[in-house]
Image (tube, grey):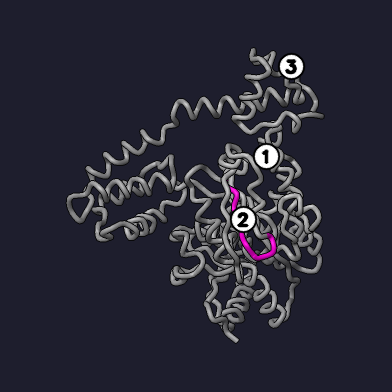
Amino acid sequence: MPPSIARSILIVDDDPDLLRLLNLRLSSAGYSVNQAASGGEAWQAFNAFRPDLVISDIRMEGMDGHALFARLHAAAPSLPVILLTAHGNIPDAVAAIQRGVFGFMTKPFDGGELLARVRDALAVSPPVTPGESANWHGFVASASPTTRELLRQAKQAADSDTPVLLAGPVGAGKTTLACAIHAARASAGPLYVLDGEQIADAGGNPFSSIDWNNRATLLIRQIDRLPSRLQVALNFVLPEHDPLKRLLTSRPITNSRIKLIVASARPLAQLVEEGGFSGELYYKLANTVIEMPPLAERRDDIPLLVAHFLAGLSPPVRSFAPSAMALLCEADWPGNVRELRNVVSRAHQGAISAVVPYDTCRELLREANLDEMQALEEARREFERDYLVRLLNATCGNVSQAARIARRNRTEFYKLLARHALEPESFKGRISGI
């Protein structure tokens, strides 16, 4: 039976007869098929239309199937790739699967087997189409290939109960993507949102009010700011061990299906090396990582984002002149989506006509760039925390030694540690660098 949605498949082989055979079988099954006679042509075709599946021969002149897969996987980790191989090349195909290839088929192959493999591969590559904007991924503007790839990864993450780590610069849209993952979950419960820095400032146990018995989603923003004691507690809640979960909540837990999503603008792997984040917790979170690129790397999304922001303002009738929109699409956006939203809001507030002109847009961008420059106090806070982490790491958490090096008395030093939610105990047992 033809698929209800015409999924796109790119077939790659330097044998024209095999290309024709694959094209015939897949097209007759209702798939949209493009073909390439080499790895180089396939890479160009991939960048042109982003297929849902790639079927490629291994042995080709120039860029072979292994090299093509490596480039495809780096650009689109969620894209399934099936490799075709002769019987004598099976060890090559097995090695490729270990690197992330979806599967391989030996030549010659049966038409029914081919279609079955294709169905299995497309099942793990969810379609992302503009017509579905009212559904779960309506949270995210998806005009660019980069963002559509993000949404495929998000849908895959939503179908699993494993934690998800959203990484990327400040303002890139990590919270928005987390909301999309939550919306994509079948029969999802409530969405709980916590902030690591706010938790550090407030103290207490923020997990105690969460009902761990439903299919809720827990989003922890700024996970890098989560105090060490709560990193330990959160590490306990990830395995399916009910007695350990009672460390977080007094409620009886029967069948927890909560989905954990965490976000960080700072690289957690680096913080682990510096002693500022639990390595055990990080390695559990890092099983599924989705990298949010800066807005400058997905400029095709900007017109959609502008339209979305304008629609949420009152009255939602203003627009940007074509020259102004072109300026928005060319800007650097150091503050990413957050900065774009602020520019649109200011343009709407100050507009005296239905269309925002070029000159107004240019001035707003200049002001926005000034706003995005890191404030001196914020920069000082970042430097201070990084310094304390390195100091505690070097002294293995010895407060007396660290305070002496920092030329502070113990009381002052403890206040500094409390300000940044740093606990000396988490640094003990490390090899001293002093």
Determine the secondary structure under disc 1: helix
Tags 2 and 1 touching, CB below 8 Å:
no
Q: Of the residues shown, which amino acid type is indicated by label 2?
A: Leu
Label located before the other in sequence (3 or 2): 2
Label 2 environment density (alpha carbons within 10 Å; few <14, some 14–19, many ≥20): many
Tags 3 and 1 touching, CB below 8 Å:
no
Residue 250 lies in magenta, yes or no?
A: no
At horizontal 74% and vertical 53% (from top left) the residue drawn is 237
Q: Quadrant of the N terminus?
A: bottom right
**Residue 419: % across, % down:** 59, 29
Q: Between marks 3 and 2, how big is the CA–CA gap?
A: 39 Å
Q: Of the residues shown, which amino acid type is indicated by label 3?
A: Gln
User: Would you name the residue on which mark 1 appears?
Assistant: 269
User: Would you name the residue on which mark 3 appears?
Assistant: 401
Mark 3 or 1, closer to the camera: 3
Q: Which stretch appears magenta?
A: 212-221
User: Would you name the residue on which mark 2 appears?
Assistant: 218
Label 3 environment density (alpha carbons within 10 Å; few <14, some 14–19, many ≥20): some
Q: Quadrant of the C terminus?
A: top right
Does residue 167 appear anywhere in the picture?
no
Label 1 environment density (alpha carbons within 10 Å; few <14, some 14–19, many ≥20): some
**Residue 259: % across, % down:** 65, 59
**Residue 34: % across, % down:** 53, 70
Q: Of the residues shown, which amino acid type is indicated by label 1?
A: Ala
From the viewer's perspective, is residue 202 above or below residue 407? Answer: below
Determine the secondary structure under disc 2: strand
Label located before the other in sequence (2 or 1): 2
Q: Between marks 2 and 1, how big is the CA–CA gap?
A: 22 Å
At horizontal 68% and vertical 73% (from top left) the residue drawn is 120
From the viewer's perspective, is residue 395 above or below residue 58? Answer: above
Front-most of 8 and 419? Answer: 419
